[in-house]
Image (cartoon, grey):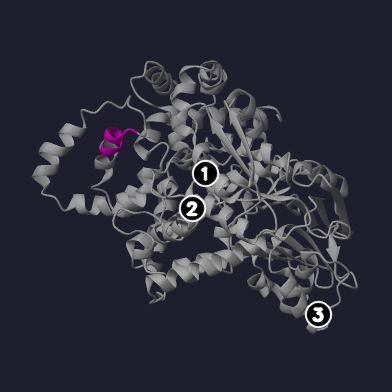
C-alpha cells in the first residue's frame, strides 16, 4: 500500500512542487518507507511508499525505459508475474521486479484498456509525457481510494481527502447535499465528497485529462460492472469444486509478498475460510490476529481460537475495552470527511495489533455481498410474503400488537427487529431496503433539520441516489436476491466497508488483502444460481458447504455477530461527557443544520433508556468532530 498525489497545471505553469510535497507528507502513514516526486514542467506526480514487493528497486514514481511514461501507484497487481511474462514476449524491457512496472508497460501496450488486465486492488495515475495526458484509474470494487478536483487552473488528485484539501487553492466549501447523504447512510457515496467541487473517482472507473484540451476537463468512464448472468447450470458438487478452485487461487495470489504476512481472523465464516486455505498453502504456521471484548455480545474470540487451534496458526489475541474517547479523534482525522460506521473502532484496534507483527494481512471482506450473508437478504423475501397477507390481519392485529413493543429494547432484540420489519414491510423493495440501511430515515431527517437548512436542500433527497442504484440493479438482475447483492456491491461495500478497512489499516501502515474481492471469485459466484447463496433460511449456503470441509461445525451455523461496539451503553456512561460536551454544545447546535430541541430530546430519550438513539447520536458526534477538525480549525 502507498499514498499517491499529483498536480497538473492546466494553464501550463510549472507545477507547484512545494504544495505537492506537503500533500505527500500528509500521506506518510500510508507509505512510511520512502517518498518520491517526478516533475515534468506543468505536471508533477508524488508518492509515499509502503514497501511490499521488490523492496530494493520498487521506488516510485516509476517510468518506462525512455522516461516518457510515468506512474504513481497505490495497491497490488496480483497477476503481475503473468503480465510481466506476456509483456516481455512483446518486447518490453523491465528494470525492476515490481508489480508497478507492469502498469507502465501495460499502458504502453494496451493504452487505457490496460486496466482490464489488472487483477488486484489499485488506484494509480499515469502521466503520458508525449501526449501531455493524465490517466487515473481505480480498482473494480473500490478498495483503494482516489480524490480529485480542479482549483485555480490546476487538476489535483490524492489518495486521501485531507491531503487534497491541504493544497492552498482548494476551497473547503461544504456540499449541503452531502450532509443529507451522510445522515441517511453514515457515508457519502461517490462521486460526491463533503466538499463542493471535490470528487471521488468511483470504483471501476478511469479518468482521462487531455492537458492540450483543458476546456474539455476531466472525463470519466466505467470499465467494469459485475454481471449476474448468464447463469451457470452446474450441479452443487461442481459449483463447490469450482468455488474451491477459484478461491484457492485468489488466496494464493494474495500470499505473494516480500514482507511478513498474516491474516485477520474474526471467527466468522469468511475470514476463517481464508485462514484455512492459507494454512493449506503455506509452508509454515500462518500468523493470525483477533481482538475480543469483555462484553460477550461482541466477542468472537472463542470461534477464532477454534480455527487457530485446528490449523496450528501462530495466533495473537487481544481483549480490549475500546476507548472511543481516545480513538475517535484519530479516526475522524484519517477519514477526512464525515463517516460514522462505529465498527471502525474495533477495526482500528485489530489493525494496530496486527501491524506490530506483520506488514500484510488477508481478511474476509466481501464474502457477505457475494454469497448473501446479511439477514436483510432473508428479510426481503419474508417482507414480500408478509405483503401477501390479508390487509385486515396486518392492519388490525399484527401491526397494533407490535407497535406496543418499546423502542428502549436493544437493537438486536428479536421483538424490536420484528417491529422494525413490519413498519417497512409494505414499502416497495427499494424503499424498504433503503429504510433498513438508513441511520436517519427521511422523515427523521426532516424533523431534525432546521427550516433554513431544509430549504437549502429542498431539491435534494438522499434516497433518490439509492433508489436509482437499486433500479439499475433490478434491470441487470431478474432474480431479486441477485438484485440485492448487486445493490450492496454498488453502495454499502465500496462506500462503507472498504472505506473503513482502507482507512483503519493504512492509519497503522498495514496492507490488507481481500480474496473474496478478487474479480474472478466475484464473477464466478455472481453467475451461480441464487439457490447456492440463499437456500431456505440458510445464508451463504455454498460458502458454508465449503466451510464444512474446512472448519469446526460449531462455527458454521451460529447467528452472525458482526464487528460492533456497545454504543448504547457507551453514550449512557463513558461517552456521556462527549455527548453533552460535543453533540449538545452551543457550538454544534448553532451551526444551522439542526433543530436543537430535536437533538436535545433524542439525547434525553436515550439517556433515560426510553429509546435507543445510539446510531443517530454517533452520527451527530462524528459530524461535529469532523467540523472541528477540518472546518473550524482552518478558518
Q: Earlier in the sequence, mark 2 or mark 1?
A: 1
Helix, strand or loop under label 1:
helix
Which residue is rendered at x = 37% and y = 39% of the image?
A: 442
Query: Where in the figure is residue 492, as x and y percent of width and height?
Result: 48, 50
Visible residue check, residue 319: yes
Residue drawn at the location 35% of the way across and 60% of the way down: 481
Q: Residue at x 51, y 66 (%)?
A: 244
Looking at the rendering, in which quadrant would you find the C terminus? Answer: top right
Question: Which image quadrant for residue 164?
Answer: top right
Residue topped by disc 1 = 306
- The dominant secondary structure in magenta is helix
Q: Residues within 10 Å of mark 2 (few under 14, many from 20)?
A: many
Left or right of 602: which side holds 45?
right
- First in sequence: mark 1 or mark 3? 3
Position in image of residue 553 (x %, y %): 42, 50
The reply to whether callout 2 and callout 3 are in contact (CB within 8 Å) is no
Q: Is residue 60 left or right of residue 364?
A: right
Q: Nearer the viewer, residue 413 or 148?
A: 413
Span colored in magenta: 413-418
- Give yes or no for contact between labels 2 and 1 (Cβ–Cβ under 8 Å): yes
Per the model, the C-alpha gap separating discs 2 and 1 is 9 Å
453 or 41, which is in the foreground?
Answer: 41
**Pointer 2 residue:** 551
Q: Which mark is residue 88?
A: 3
Instruction: Please indicate whether residue 187 sits to the left or right of residue 116 in the image.
Output: left
The tag earlier along the polypeptide, 2 or 3, is: 3
Vertical comparison of 455 with 580: above or below: below
Q: Please check the rendered image and state whether residue 392 is part of the magenta-colored stretch, yes or no.
A: no
Callout 2 secondary element: loop
Amino acid at each position: 500500500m502507498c499514498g499517491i498525489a499529483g498536480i497538473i497545471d492546466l494553464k501550463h505553469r510549472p507545477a507547484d512542487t512545494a504544495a505537492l510535497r506537503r500533500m505527500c507528507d500528509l500521506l506518510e502513514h500510508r507509505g512510511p518507507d520512502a517518498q518520491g516526486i517526478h516533475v515534468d514542467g506543468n505536471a508533477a506526480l508524488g508518492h509515499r511508499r509502503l514497501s511490499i514487493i521488490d523492496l530494493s528497486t520498487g521506488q516510485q514514481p516509476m517510468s518506462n525505459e525512455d522516461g516518457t511514461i510515468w506512474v504513481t501507484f497505490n495497491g497490488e497487481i496480483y497477476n503481475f508475474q503473468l503480465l510481466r511474462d506476456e509483456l516481455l514476449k512483446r518486447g518490453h524491457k523491465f528494470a525492476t521486479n515490481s508489480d508497478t512496472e507492469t502498469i507502465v508497460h501495460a499502458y504502453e501496450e494496451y493504452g487505457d484498456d490496460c486496466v482490464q488486465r489488472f487483477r488486484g486492488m489499485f488506484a494509480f495515475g499515469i502521466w503520458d509525457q508525449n501526449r501531455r495526458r493524465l490517466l487515473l484509474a481505480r480498482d473494480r470494487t473500490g478498495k483503494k481510494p482516489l480524490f480529485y478536483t480542479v482549483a485555480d487552473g490546476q487538476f489535483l488528485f490524492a489518495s486521501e481527502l485531507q491531503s487534497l484539501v491541504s493544497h492552498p487553492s482548494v476551497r473547503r466549501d461544504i456540499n449541503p447535499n452531502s450532509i443529507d447523504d451522510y445522515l441517511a447512510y453514515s457515508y457519502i457515496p461517490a462521486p460526491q465528497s463533503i466538499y463542493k467541487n471535490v470528487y471521488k473517482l468511483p470504483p471501476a472507473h478511469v479518468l482521462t485529462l487531455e492537458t492540450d484540451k483543458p476546456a474539455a476537463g476531466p472525463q470519466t468512464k466505467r470499465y467494469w460492472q459485475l454481471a449476474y448472468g448468464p447463469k451457470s447450470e452446474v450441479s452443487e458438487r461442481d459449483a463447490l469444486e469450482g468455488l474451491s478452485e477459484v478461491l484457492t487461487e485468489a488466496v494464493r495470489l494474495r500470499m505473494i509478498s516480500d514482507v511478513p504476512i498474516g491474516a485477520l481472523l474474526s471467527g466468522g465464516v469468511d475470514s476463517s475460510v481464508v485462514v484455512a486455505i492459507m494454512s493449506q498453502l503455506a509452508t509454515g504456521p500462518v500468523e493470525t490476529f483477533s481482538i475480543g471484548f469483555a462484553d460477550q455480545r461482541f466477542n468472537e474470540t472463542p470461534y477464532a481460537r477454534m480455527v487457530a487451534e485446528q490449523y496450528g496458526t501462530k495466533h495473537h489475541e487481544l481483549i480490549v475495552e475500546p476507548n472511543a474517547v481516545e480513538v475517535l479523534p484519530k479516526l475522524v482525522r484519517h477519514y477526512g470527511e464525515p463517516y460514522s460506521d462505529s465498527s471502525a473502532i474495533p477495526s482500528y484496534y485489530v489493525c494496530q495489533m496486527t501491524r506490530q507483527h506483520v506488514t500484510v494481512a488477508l481478511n474476509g471482506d466481501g464474502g457477505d455481498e457475494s454469497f448473501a450473508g446479511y439477514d436483510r437478504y432473508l428479510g426481503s423475501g419474508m417482507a414480500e410474503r408478509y405483503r401477501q397477507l390479508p390487509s385486515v390481519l396486518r392492519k388490525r392485529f399484527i401491526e397494533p400488537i407490535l407497535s406496543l413493543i418499546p423502542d428502549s429494547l436493544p437493537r438486536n432484540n428479536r421483538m424490536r427487529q420484528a417491529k422494525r420489519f413490519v413498519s417497512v414491510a409494505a414499502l416497495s423493495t427499494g424503499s424498504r431496503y433503503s429504510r433498513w440501511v438508513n441511520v436517519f430515515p427521511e422523515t427523521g431527517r426532516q424533523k431534525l433539520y432546521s427550516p433554513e437548512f431544509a430549504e437549502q436542500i429542498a431539491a435534494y433527497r438522499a434516497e433518490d441516489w439509492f433508489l436509482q442504484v437499486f433500479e439499475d440493479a433490478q434491470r441487470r438482475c431478474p432474480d431479486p436476491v441477485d438484485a440485492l447483492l448487486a445493490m450492496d456491491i454498488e453502495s454499502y461495500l465500496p462506500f462503507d466497508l472498504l472505506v473503513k478497512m482502507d482507512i483503519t489499516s493504512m492509519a497503522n501502515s498495514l496492507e490488507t488483502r481481500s480474496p473474496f474481492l478478487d474479480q474472478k471469485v466475484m464473477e464466478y459466484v455472481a453467475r451461480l444460481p441464487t439457490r447456492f447463496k440463499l437456500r431456505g433460511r440458510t445464508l451463504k449456503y455454498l460458502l458454508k458447504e465449503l466451510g464444512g470441509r474446512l472448519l469446526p461445525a460449531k462455527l458454521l451455523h451460529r447467528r452472525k455477530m458482526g464487528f460492533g461496539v456497545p454504543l448504547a451503553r457507551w453514550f449512557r456512561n463513558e461517552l456521556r461527557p462527549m455527548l453533552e460536551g460535543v453533540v449538545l454544545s452551543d457550538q454544534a447546535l448553532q451551526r444551522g443544520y439542526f433543530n436543537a430541541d430535536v437533538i436535545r430530546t433524542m439525547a434525553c430519550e436515550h439517556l433515560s433508556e426510553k429509546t435507543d438513539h445510539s446510531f443517530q447520536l454517533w452520527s451527530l458526534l462524528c459530524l461535529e468532530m469532523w467540523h472541528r477538525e477540518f472546518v473550524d480549525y482552518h478558518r
